[in-house]
Structure formats: C-alpha cells, structure tokens
C-alpha cells in the first residue's frame, strides 16, 4: 500500500514533464526536426556548425518513431535540399537533389548536365564568413543554373574529384544528390541513387550558426536564414 502511494505521488509529480518530453520527441520524429551539420559538403550554402530546420511533412507522414508511411502527398524534387539516410552505410546526410526520377544526369569536366542540357556558370561571391581550415586552398565560387534553377557551388582548384561521370538515368522512386561543395562531397557520384524512402525531409532554413574553429563565435548574419 505504501509503495502504491509513493508511485502515485511520483506519477502526479512527473507526468506533466513526461508528457512534454513525449510530445517533443513525437514532434521531432514525425513533424519537423533540427540537425547540427558536422561537415562542409554543402558549403557555401550551409556551413559546418550550423543548425538546420527539416520539414518532415514536406512529402508525407510516417508513424512516429518508425519508417511506416501513413500517406504521401509529394515527392522530393530537383533543386531541393534534403536530409537523407545514406544508401551506403545509413549515415544521415544533407545534400541537394540535382536529378529526379526519369532525368538523365552526367558531368563533363565539372559541368553538370541534366537531360543533355549543360548547366551555366557565373562568378559567385566568396563566402562572407571564413571557411574551416581544411578548405583554405583556392576555390572557384560559382552560381550554377540548370533547368531554370540556380544555386551557389564551390569547386576546388587544387583537388578536383569526380568531374566526369555518366550519363545515367535516375530510376523511378529514386533521386540523385550532390553536395554544393563539389570536390569535398561524398554523394550519388560515389554511392549511387537514393531511394525516396531514405529521404527524411526538406531542409528549409538555417536556425543558428557558430564558427567552431573560432571559439564558437556566432555568425549572426546567418541565423534564421531561409534556404533554397
């Protein structure tokens, strides 16, 4: 009897906290989440040390804490930044979709081609904030435009990788992803197509940004920045 009374007292004291924790965990599992970015594969769009917002309802809804899909109302599309589970080893990655199902994708000398149409490149502005030391070498900063969509990319002048591949056709139910930091990204050029069920959600904003190589100094101008 005494044990039951203590248990009831413990429950009355803790159930509001447990309810809040469960609600937050359910929200992050099925609705939206935020992730810390540990690498520079998406520079100059996303820096190391940034916390990004991921909309998990962008393409459908899953049972919380599982991979069971209840409904799907959209598919990941070319140009979108996504969070995905790598088909190589299951690691969580942040990449940009450069080709979707049915697209023919190739690269020649670093120039991306979608359905035979080469991307165009214009000079881009260097990053406004210092890059981590491992990216201190010379780079080209470019605005890449293909299929009426533009975004910033960077390419190494010292360590070019995988500048030629394809053409390959993206199969149904898959996407082809790449990092905006083209010469420092482990992506579909190496691990192949990504099944859409591996896509966690659509990345739409930077919530916060700190420079870990400079004593965690905030990059205030990047807080609450929308991504495209």
Image: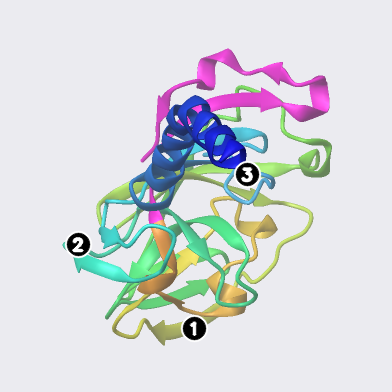
Of residues 81 and 64, which is closer to you in this image?
A: 64
Marks 1 and 2: CB-CB under 8 Å? no
Q: Quadrant of residue 120?
A: bottom left
| 206 versus 134 height, above or below | above
Q: Residue 63's spot in the image, x, y percent?
A: 32, 62
Circle 3 or circle 2, nearest the eye:
2
- The quadrant of the picture occupied by the N terminus is top right
Marks 3 and 2: CB-CB under 8 Å? no
Q: Which residue is mark 1?
A: 166
Mark number for residue 74?
2
What residue lies at 45% left-to-right and 65% top-to-bottom?
Answer: 112
* Residues drawn in magenta: 201-228
Q: Residue 57's spot in the image, x, y percent?
A: 28, 51
Circle 3 or circle 1, nearest the eye:
1
| 93 versus 39 height, above or below | below
- Looking at the rendered structure, the secondary structure element under dot 3 is strand
Farthest residue, direction left = 73
What residue lies at 57% left-to-right and 14% top-to-bottom?
Answer: 220
| Other residues around mark 2 within 10 Å, as few (<14) / some (14–19) / many (≥20) | few
Ranked by sequence position, the earlier of labels 3 and 2 is: 2
Ranked by sequence position, the earlier of labels 3 and 1 is: 3
- Looking at the rendered structure, the secondary structure element under dot 2 is loop
């Amino acid at each position: 009897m005494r044990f039951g009374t203590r248990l009831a007292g413990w429950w009355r004291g803790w159930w509001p906290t447990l309810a809040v924790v469960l609600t937050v965990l359910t929200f992050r599992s099925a609705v939206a989440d935020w992730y810390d970015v540990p690498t520079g594969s998406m520079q100059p769009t996303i820096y190391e040390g940034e916390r990004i917002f991921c909309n998990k309802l962008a393409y459908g809804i899953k049972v919380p804490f599982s991979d069971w899909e209840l409904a799907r109302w959209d598919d990941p599309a070319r140009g979108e930044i996504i969070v995905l589970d790598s088909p190589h080893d299951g690691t969580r990655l942040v990449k940009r979709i450069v080709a979707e199902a049915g697209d023919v994708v190739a690269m020649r000398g670093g120039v991306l081609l979608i359905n035979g149409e080469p991307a165009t490149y214009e000079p881009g502005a260097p990053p406004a904030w210092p890059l981590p030391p491992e990216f201190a070498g010379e780079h080209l900063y470019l605005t890449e435009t293909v299929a009426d969509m533009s975004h910033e990319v960077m390419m190494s002048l010292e360590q070019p990788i995988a500048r030629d591949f394809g053409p390959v056709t993206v199969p149904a139910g898959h996407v082809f992803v790449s990092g905006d930091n083209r010469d420092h990204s482990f992506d579909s050029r190496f691990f192949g197509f990504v099944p859409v069920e591996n896509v966690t959600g659509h990345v739409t904003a930077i919530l916060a940004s700190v420079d870990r190589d400079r004593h965690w100094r905030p990059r205030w101008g990047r807080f609450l920045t929308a991504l495209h």
